[in-house]
Amino acid sequence: MIAAVWWWLATPVSLVRAPIDPAAKLECVSYAPFRGDQTPLIPSTQISAGQIAQDLARLAKISKCVRTYSVDNGLDQVPELAGKVGLKVIQGIWLGSNRLKNLAQIATVVNLTKEYPGVISAVVVGNEVLLRGEMTAADLEATIRSVKSQVQVPVTYADVWEYWLRNREIYNAVDFVTIHILPYWEDFPIRARNAAAHVDSIRKRVAVAFPAKEILIGETGWPSAGRMRDGALPSRANQARVVSEILDLAKRENFRVNLIEAYDQPWKRQLEGTVGGYWGLIDADQRAEKYPAGVPITNYPAWKLQMGAGLGLSALVFAVGMLTLRRRPWPPRFVSWLTVAISATAAGILLGVAIDKMLYESFGLGVWMRWGGLLAAGIASPLLCAYATMSGRSLPTFLELLGPRPGRTHSWSTVLLGVTLLVTTLIAAETALGFVFDPRYRDFPFAALTMAVVPFAGLMLVNRPQLGLRPIAESVFAGLLVVSVLYIGFNEGPDNWQSLWTCAIYLLFGVTLWRARAAQIPE
């Protein structure tokens, strides 16, 4: 079963055209040069000319043009370096609420257009500054007209398509209209299979509102990793599909598209969570194309290795159960073997998914500790619960681990199982509260959480203590999880299967904790 599921998960997708095809170069792609720990959020960050030149040399093989957003952090070097490899540049001016910084940006870009007239093909005066509320439409219009009077190339402004429709006066100041259409980030998120049709629909709607000028799609694309929003699922296959279908549409209907973006940008994860860092066509760390020509596109390129690890863990869980029986004089009940089999199968299927999610979603020491701890619990839980199930032991309570000394357990296996339960409980509670109070950029821990919780639930079902008091700590955590599920399910909606899965595991865990019983400690 584990092999069958992984074969299904790794099935390659069929596309109308290759997302990256050197024989049919991209019209343009957004470019930011930051790698590793580099971030524009630290003003002193300066990217070297050598690093930018290396990036642009690779991009020149797949694109005709790059779009930039600023001249800070060394990006003022892009026009010179792009010209050397035959790339055009749509040069950005970053506008904000600081007028002095705006004037410095404008002065630099005006000089660049004069110095590299054959490279800079257009100037974008401001990016989503109306969306951020950092300028009024009147101030923006005046700024655009000021820049337009100083340069000899076409001038535009870039923003989400709704803000163009809300601020139509900007239309008269620009040479062409640049709109951003990001189906994943729409107020009502669009599924990947409908993304290209959505882009086309919005483009035509804006064209009706602004009929006399070109409509450039200045940003569109899809993330390859991150959390679902309604039915919009970030994944490698979905990113490839959306990019492929949009490029095919642009070719058939003859409109220009700038994809976001060239390289994955890890720094964006500080602002937008995991999903913010994975919009690139090229990997941030290896600087390798995500979709090389001729290579099948799948969500799990290393699926054979992941399947093998899962099969190994599953076999180990069964081995623990069988070895435990050799030390017990009684035969196990059928339900005991059934719970071990379910735990082993779930762990075997989900181990590769959980590792994949941990690698993509961990950013910063705290997040690495959280997801690493949950994955460790997910691996330990089926092994320890198999031992406890076959040895007739019940799920320990927190009192046995942390309570008064006379009631604490002295069994090493019970202590390990208790620690695993405690780690899972704390992480489950923390993530559940996160989805209640600050959900927008949080990832759903469905894979590792399932690996950990299913064995706990099975053990509680098979070897539940019949006598004892209901512990307060377990009851509080159970109530917290159940109440959180009610809100999360309503807030995330019925189309988000990651949310529904996670809520189901929270609920199962809550019931498991509620059923706990602790022996009364003699005074």
Image (cartoon, helix red, strand yellow):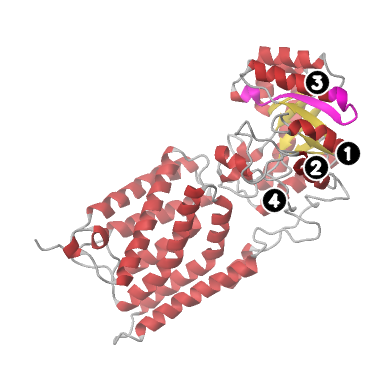
Q: Which residue is mark 1?
A: 84
Residue indicated by mark 4 = 283
- Residue 355 quadrant: bottom right
- Residue 107, position as x, y percentages in the image: 76, 19
- Asked if the magenta segment contains residue 106, the reply would be no
Question: What amino acid is labelled 1 in the image?
Answer: Lys
Q: Nearer the viewer, mark 3 or mark 2?
A: 2
Q: Can residue 114 be found in the magenta stretch?
A: yes
Drawn side of residue 81 relative to residue 518, left or right: right
Evaluate whether residue 163 shows in this view: yes
Which amino acid type is shown beneath numbered disc 4? Answer: Asp
Given residues 489 and 457, the one toward you in this image is: 457
Q: Earlier in the sequence, mark 4 or mark 3?
A: 3
Q: Which residue is mark 3?
A: 110
Q: Which residues are magenta?
A: 113-131
Residue type (three-letter) at the residue carrying disc 2: Ala
Q: Determine the CA span between mark 3 and mark 2.
A: 22 Å
